[in-house]
């Protein structure tokens, strides 16, 4: 089996932890509690869209998505590229 071919390494587990009715902490479910890489950012419902404020790899970068489904798909895709 070649290196990097397992599903475990390429499929992120994205956990949305509710902080309020409109805000979630976005966590990498593959990281243990206490691991500084666990928190990916914060997702918030804003004016009918969903804004993701990234904490990794560079804090403060934000992106908006038209739906929560598109937001979580984009978050999972970007999480696959993070160290």
Image (tube, grey):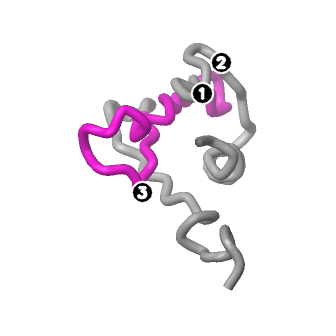
Residue beneath the point at 74% across and 38% down: 66
Instruction: Give the residue at mark 2.
Output: 61
Quarter occupied by residue 3: bottom right
Q: Nearer the viewer, residue 12 or 20?
A: 12
Task: Nearest to the eye among marks 2 and 3: give it.
Answer: 3
Say what secondary structure mark 3 lies in: loop
Instruction: Quadrant for the C terminus, please.
Output: top right
Residue stretch rendered in magenta on the structure: 24-51
Quarter occupied by residue 36: top left
Instruction: Give the residue at mark 1.
Output: 57
Name of the residue lying farthest toward the bottom:
1
Instruction: Give the residue at mark 3.
Output: 30
Q: Earlier in the sequence, mark 3 or mark 1?
A: 3
Say what secondary structure mark 1 lies in: loop
Horizontal side, residue 30 vs residue 52: left or right: left
Magenta-colored stretch includes residue 67: no
Instruction: Quadrant for the N terminus, please.
Output: bottom right
Residue beneath the point at 63% across and 64% down: 10
């Amino acid at each position: 089996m070649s290196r990097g071919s397992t599903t475990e390494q390429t499929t992120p587990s994205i956990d949305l932890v509710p902080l309020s009715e409109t805000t979630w902490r976005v966590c990498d479910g593959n990281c243990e509690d206490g691991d500084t890489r666990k928190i990916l950012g914060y997702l918030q419902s804003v004016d009918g869209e969903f804004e993701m404020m990234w904490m990794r790899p560079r804090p403060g970068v934000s992106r908006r998505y038209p739906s929560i489904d598109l937001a979580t798909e984009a978050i999972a895709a970007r999480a696959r590229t993070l160290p």
